[in-house]
Image: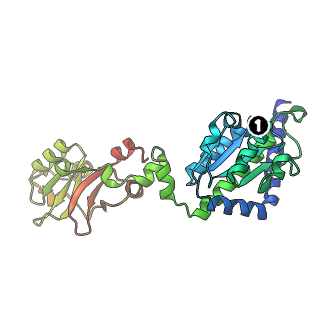
Amino acid sequence: MIEETARKVLRLEAQAIQELIGRIDRNFVRAIELLHDCKGRVVVTGMGKSGLIGKKIAATLASTGTPAFFLHPAEGVHGDLGMVSRGDAVILISNSGETGELITILPAFKRLGVPLICLTGRLRSTLAKNSDIVIDVSVKEEAGPLGLVPTASTTATLAMGDALSVALLEKRGFKEADFAYFHPGGAIGKKLLLNVTDVWHHGPAVPRVTEKAPLKDVILEMTSKKLGMTTVVNSRGKLSGVITDGDLRRLLEREPSPMRKKAADVMTRKPKVIAPTALAAKAVQIMEQYSITTLVVADAKRNVSGVVHLHDLLKAGVI
C-alpha cells in the first residue's frame, strides 16, 4: 500500500510536468523577452507553498545572472513594497489566481507600471486577467489525498520556473565562468575560478637542482622541500627534467652504486608541465591522465616558476 501510494504520487507529478511541454508557446517566449529586457530586478512573489516555490525560482534566477529576489506578499503590504521600483518585473505565483495577499498588492504594482508575469492554474482568475503575460501551470489533479495538498501543482510550477531560468540564461549567453562568479564557494566555482598560481609552491619553495648535482644533493633537496620530487635545470636554468621518489626507488633497485650518479642520470626527461595561467582544474586533468601527483609550472621557454601538488588541489577543493 505504501509503495503503491508513493508510485502514484510520482506518476501524477511526472505527468504534470510532461503536460507542461505542450504549453511552451508564444506567452513563454514573451516572458523570456520581457525578463531579458528588464532593466531592474525580477521580483518573485507568492503565498504559502507557492511562496516557497517562488523563493527557489528567485534563487535560481539570481544564481544564473538575473538579479532577482523574493517578496513576501503579506510583508509587502506592510512596507516591503518599497523594495520594488520602476523598471523591475514581477512574477506572480498562485495556483488559484485568487490569492488575497497578491490581489491586495496588485494595485501597487499597477501604479508602478511594472510588467506582471503570472504563473497560475486558472487562466480566467483575477491575477491572470490583470497580468501582462500568463503561463499555464495547471494540473489535472493533486497527488495528495482528496486533492487538498499542493503537490503536483507546486512541482509543475517549480519545473516551469526552471524552464524560465534556463531559457533566460541561454538567451543571456551565460557561460560556465559566469556561473563560477556567482558560486565562488562551491566546487564548480573553484574548478572554474582557481588558477594554478592559487595553489602552487613557488619561489624558494620550489625544489631545484642542476643536471650535475650529485645524488646526495638531490635527496637533500627533495627532503627539505617535502614535495616528493625536484626539478632539474640545465646550465641556462631551463627545465630539463624531474626526479621523483619513484625514480629514486627504481634507481636503488637496479644500481649497485647509486650514490655515484648525477641528477641528469636519474631524471625523467620531458616532464609534464602546465602554464602559470592555466586553471587548477586543468592540472587535475593532466595528473589523472598520466597518473602523476605533481606538475611543474613553467612557461613556453621552459622557465620553471613553481610546482603544483595533488594534495594542494585536494585542500583547495578542486577535486
Residue carrying label 1: 101
Q: Is residue 10 visible?
A: no
Where residue 201 appears, as percent x and y from the top left, is: 25, 49
Between 173 and 305, the one nearer to me in the picture: 173
When the figure is inspected, residue 285 is found, relative to residue 225, above or below; the finding is: below
Q: Residue at x 9, y 53 (%)?
A: 214
Q: Is residue 9 left or right of residue 282?
A: right
Q: Is residue 136 left or right of residue 171?
A: right
Where residue 303 appears, as percent x and y from the top left, is: 20, 64
Residue type at tag 1: Glu
Between 64 and 146, the one nearer to me in the picture: 64
Q: Secondary structure at mark 1?
A: helix
Q: Is residue 221 left or right of residue 141?
A: left
Q: Name the residue at the front extreme.
A: 111
Quarter occupied by the N terminus: top right
Where residue 84 appears, as percent x and y from the top left, is: 62, 46
When the figure is inspected, residue 207 is found, relative to residue 71, above or below; the finding is: below
When the figure is inspected, residue 239 is found, relative to residue 74, above or below; the finding is: below
Q: Residue at x 82, y 39 (%)?
A: 9
Q: Name the residue at the top extreme.
A: 2
Q: Quadrant of residue 306?
A: bottom left
Where residue 121 appears, as percent x and y from the top left, is: 84, 47
Name the image colouring.
rainbow
Q: Residue at x 84, y 38 (%)?
A: 143
Between 3 and 34, the one nearer to me in the picture: 34
Q: Is residue 251 left or right of residue 138?
A: left
